[in-house]
Image (tube, helix red, strand yellow):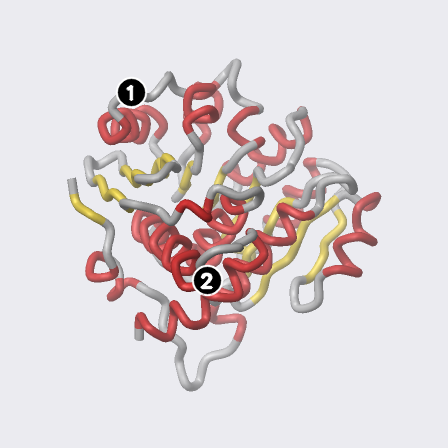
Amino acid sequence: MTDNSPKLWRDALPRLKPDGSKYDRGHAIIFGGPIQSTGAARMAARAALRVGSGLVSVACSPAALTVYATTLQAVMTKPVKDAETFGELIADPRMNAVLIGPAAGINAHTRACVLKALEAKKACVLDADALTVFKDDPRTLFDAIKSPVVLTPHEGEFARIFWKAGDREGDALRAAGASGAIVLLKGKDTVVAAPDGRVIINRDAPPQLATAGSGDVLAGLITGLLAQGMDAFHAAAAGAWMHAEAARRFGPGLIAEDIETQIPAVLKALG
């Protein structure tokens, strides 16, 4: 097993071009939850923007639009009333990475939008509710994966769509093979496994990351890296490392909103 470190993926990190524009840096779509649960998507969206995605939009129901539009500044908002509208939105080839899951809701709408994103063959990060909605039929999810996809379960979510993890490294690797996706199994030692047998372990995450919303920020970081063209395995590994490093830099008293504020210093140190 290989320990996660920048030497494994630094060369794959997106680099700014002197003559580039925001359109060269990708457009990430964050699936927004209902009006009572908007914080998770907002944190993920800011993380995606902070790590370098040129544009970030939250796709949300018209009922929740006002909350997103009045609390986000550089992040745009796109009202989508149903899965068909969501599919039409992400059909735009400029929208090249999609995150679904953080406080999305465990319902048929979330499930349908996950399948729309996979049908469109977008680079995807599927987290939280986007995994749980397939707990009774994970094969449908796995069969739909034909594009770069990162699944980011904690152990409970992992058990819902795979099995109860015992040997975390071995189980993450088996799950990657079964699903056809990169599997990032969160924990103190986060495991990133690929279907081709590659495994990276991000060891000794700072304990202050055990706070509400931390995983939403991680999902946003990975999505922002995917939007810039980073391959899924390295984006997952880099996102996990940056997430932990940001928490170390902040120290005690960390809440999820603080993580993305440390990303500029983390990126600067990476060179």
Between 37 and 94, the residue placed more toward the observer is 37
Residue 183 lies in quadrant:
top left
Q: Residue at x 56, y 34 (%)?
A: 114
Q: Residue at x 25, y 24 (%)?
A: 167
Q: Visible in this render: residue 254?
A: yes
Return the disc, 1 or 2, that comes first in the chain's sequence.
Answer: 1
**How many marks can you see?**
2
Dot 2: few (<14), some (14–19), or many (≥20) neighbours within 10 Å?
A: some
Between 94 and 77, the residue placed more toward the observer is 77
At numbered mark 1, what does the secondary structure look like: helix, strand or loop?
loop
Q: Residue furthest top?
A: 136
Q: Residue furthest front?
A: 252
Q: Which mark is residue 250?
A: 2
Marks 1 & 2, CB-CB < 8 Å contact: no
* Residue 230, percent from left and from top: 36, 58
Dot 1: few (<14), some (14–19), or many (≥20) neighbours within 10 Å?
A: few
Q: Residue at x 48, y 58 (%)?
A: 224
* Residue 150, percent from left and from top: 41, 41
Residue under label 1: 166
**Image-based side of 88 in relation to 247, left or right:** right
**Image-based side of 96 in relation to 230, left or right:** right
Q: Residue furthest bottom?
A: 18
Amino acid beneath label 2: Phe
Position above or below: 55 against 58: below
Amino acid beneath label 1: Gly
**Image-based side of 29 in relation to 14, left or right:** right
Q: Residue furthest left?
A: 1
Position above or below: 134 against 82: above
